[in-house]
Amino acid sequence: MVTSSTTNENPNPEQDEKLRELTAQSWNLELVISGAALFAVLQLPDLLDEAFDYFRFNLMTQTTGLHLIFPSLVYSLMRATGYVLFMAFLTNFVMRAYWVGLVGLRAVYPSGIHYDRIPFTTKQSQERMAAKLGPLDAYVHRLDQRCNIVFAVAFLFVFLLILVAFTYVQVLVIYSIVRPVVPAPYWLLIKIVAGTLALGYLFTSVVLNLPRIRSNPRGAIWHDRFTAMNKVMYWGLYKPVVFIVNTFYSHIPYQKLARTMVLMMGCFFVVVMVEFLVDFSRVNRRTTSLNRHHLFSTRVDSLYVNPSAYNNLRAEDAYIEQAAIQADVTRDPFIRLFIAYPKALDTLLTRLAPEPVWSDTLARAEKRRRFAAWSHQQINQFIHLTINDSLYQNPDLLFTQWGQHHQKGWQTVLLPTNLRPGKNLIRIGIQADPSKRPEEIITLPFWYIPEK
């Protein structure tokens, strides 16, 4: 027979009295913690934006398919969790403040509500209010319980955010550190094995949680072992999470708890999906799925003015997506050009230009000098620049780190002789094979207004 508690777990009378005192005084701590949590959660979106932008430009090796969707989905999940956290702590803060007001009101009027003294009502209305609302003390007690429940649920979302963040960091480390050193055939085998293990884990979880399996003695043993193995996935938060969850399980009817969980997860899923669409549009500002207009398109570079591609239009703290020039309208007879060097482009250039083997007899300073000269020569060979359909020879791109984020890239000043008044186009691409057409990076339209 399984008992609800053991002798060691039951507090003695002195501990029980101390726990009651702490419970009675916990409301002021809840207000302080909720206020601090609200302030911290408000900082979370900006921190997530900075972290995700850094990841996109410095760690993300591919920007298509699942390699783009998965990080964006996790990013949106964390942002949505932050919004839910904010609402949970704000709800607790408001409810607890209201509770403090009622406690103060009860201190002024200890006898509570006298329904028979309420004016402008009939006797039947007074009786209905008394039966429906009840005494003030009971309402204050119920409100105190609701505040405690909301506070505990808010911390469940805190733990969810921590678990998602730690898991994402683990996946990020694998893709950023382990993936580049594993050959492609072995990496494909690793993905197949990992996918098989994930499906096996899900299948085992479903089977071992079937009532018929759990009631079997041998099945119960395997269920316990599987549950113990799952502790690793909590990143050290197993006990904090389980204490809250098991308390709800042991006091709330299963059907009511299941309905509540399905409703909450459904609402949370909707919030995540909406946030994903919004974030995807923020990351790729040329996505118009949420803002369709009949005669509007952002798909052709030469017909679209991208604000992030012009220094005078781009926000000071924003990254440069592909390339940028000084302004969309210029009187200068030159073009100050910056070409971004994200990690995804580095993956391509690593394949196109393998590093030569340097002699071991060279000093470290000499190796660095030769590597810099070789890198400069390679990038000026691969970058293909045209201005108004005329090839620009020898752009002489130099290495630089742009802006407050120290974004890596190349910079040069072009002195074209074929600028015409009005609209001009500068096309930037990568040409690995001179016999083939270059792979276009971006086309920038700009307007040249010469000095009179």
Image (spheres, helix red, strand yellow):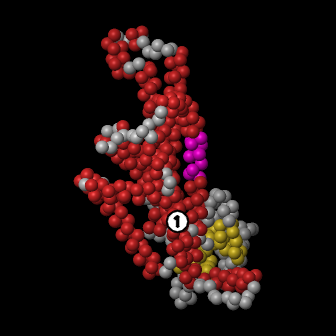
Position in image of residue 260 (x %, y %): 35, 42
Closer to the camera in the image, 159 or 377: 159
**Image point (68%, 85%), residue name:** 374
Q: Main secondary structure of the magenta part?
A: helix
Q: Secondary structure at mark 1?
A: helix
44 part of magenta stretch: yes
Q: Is residue 230 left or right of residue 284?
A: left
Relative to 399, does residue 405 appear above or below in the rendering?
above
Which residue in the structure is indicated by mark 1?
Answer: 172
Looking at the rendered image, the quarter that the N terminus falls into is top left
**Image point (54%, 21%), residue name:** 104
Position in image of residue 344 (x %, y %): 55, 72
**Image point (34%, 19%), residue name:** 131
**Image point (58%, 67%), residue name:** 57
Residue 251 seen? yes
Closer to the camera in the image, 192 or 41: 192
Looking at the rendered image, the quarter that the C terminus falls into is bottom right
Closer to the camera in the image, 256 or 308: 256
Residue occupying the far left of the picture: 212
- Dot 1: within a 10 Å radius of its alpha carbon, few (fewer than 14), some, or many (20 or more) residues? some
Residue 233 image-quadrant placement: bottom left
Amino acid, disc 1: Leu
Position in image of residue 41 (x %, y %): 56, 46
Over which residues does the magenta segment extend?
A: 36-46
Residue 451 image-quadrant placement: bottom right
124 part of magenta stretch: no
Q: Is residue 184 left or right of residue 310?
A: left
